């Protein structure tokens, strides 16, 4: 499968590969069937980006669609600060930076660079406590691992998947009531 991958799916896949499949199954249903409070809060956070109401300052690009030809990824950035050359991903509440969150930001960064923008700094901003976490730009080793993750997403098959189930992740998964793998 060499389809375009949504950037937002990278974080989901790293959390649990099976969640990508379940998202596809349930995306035509009303979100209240499968979304929990954290997902609804996150959606509210992104409304200011979607509506370009984060700031009226011209230095901020908000909700811009991006595409990486190299990795065949598509998505939207939250904020790009043209003055500081900083890419900022906003989340409702961050307690720990996970690889999936970093890789989602890397994908946005790669797509912005392919489009001709200079990205010198990466941040994940936690709105609940107004903390901003600096994320290192990906080095060569990180980019290799990033590419492997993207290939894993492309090759994933629900029928042949042998990924192990993590009971801790299952308890936090929005699909836990709907997933046969959550029987752990």
Image (cartoon, helix red, strand yellow):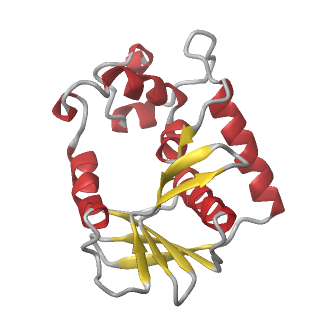
Q: Is residue 28 above or below residue 169?
A: above
Using the image as rendered, state which of residue 92 and residue 115 is in the foreground.
115
Using the image as rendered, state which of residue 78 and residue 10 is in the foreground.
78
Using the image as rendered, state which of residue 164 and residue 30 is in the foreground.
30
Residue at horizontal 65%, vertical 80%? 120
Q: Is residue 140 above or below residue 156?
A: below
User: In which quadrant will I find the C terminus?
Assistant: top left
Q: On the image, which quarter does residue 56 sit in?
A: bottom left
Q: Is residue 72 left or right of residue 54?
A: right
Residue at horizontal 40%, vertical 21%? 182
Residue at horizontal 43%, vertical 86%? 59
**Residue 178 spot, x, y in % from top left:** 31, 19
Q: On the image, which quarter does residue 183 sit in?
A: top left
Q: How many marks?
A: 0
Residue at horizontal 57%, vertical 83%? 85
Q: Is residue 115 left or right of residue 60?
A: right
**Residue 148 spot, x, y in % from top left:** 75, 41
**Residue 169 spot, x, y in % from top left:** 44, 36
Residue lying furthest right in this view? 140
User: In which quadrant will I find the N terminus?
Assistant: top right
Using the image as rendered, state which of residue 166 and residue 132 is in the foreground.
132
**Residue 144 spot, x, y in % from top left:** 80, 50
């Amino acid at each position: 499968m060499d389809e375009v991958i949504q950037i937002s799916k990278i974080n989901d896949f790293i959390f649990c590969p099976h969640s990508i499949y379940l998202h596809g199954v349930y995306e035509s249903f009303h979100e209240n069937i499968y979304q929990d409070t954290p997902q609804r809060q996150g959606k509210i956070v992104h409304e200011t980006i979607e509506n370009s109401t984060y700031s009226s300052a011209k230095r901020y690009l908000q909700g811009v669609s991006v595409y990486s030809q190299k990795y065949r990824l598509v998505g939207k950035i939250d904020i790009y600060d043209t003055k500081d050359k900083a890419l900022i991903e906003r989340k409702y509440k961050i307690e720990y930076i996970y690889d999936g969150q970093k890789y989602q930001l890397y994908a946005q960064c790669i797509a912005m660079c392919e489009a001709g923008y200079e990205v010198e700094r990466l941040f994940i901003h936690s709105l609940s406590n107004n903390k901003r976490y600096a994320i290192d730009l990906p080095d060569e080793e990180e980019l290799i691992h990033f590419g492997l993750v993207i290939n894993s997403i492309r090759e994933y098959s629900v029928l042949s998947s042998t990924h192990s189930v993590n009971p801790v992740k299952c308890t936090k998964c929005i699909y836990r009531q709907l997933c046969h793998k959550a029987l752990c």
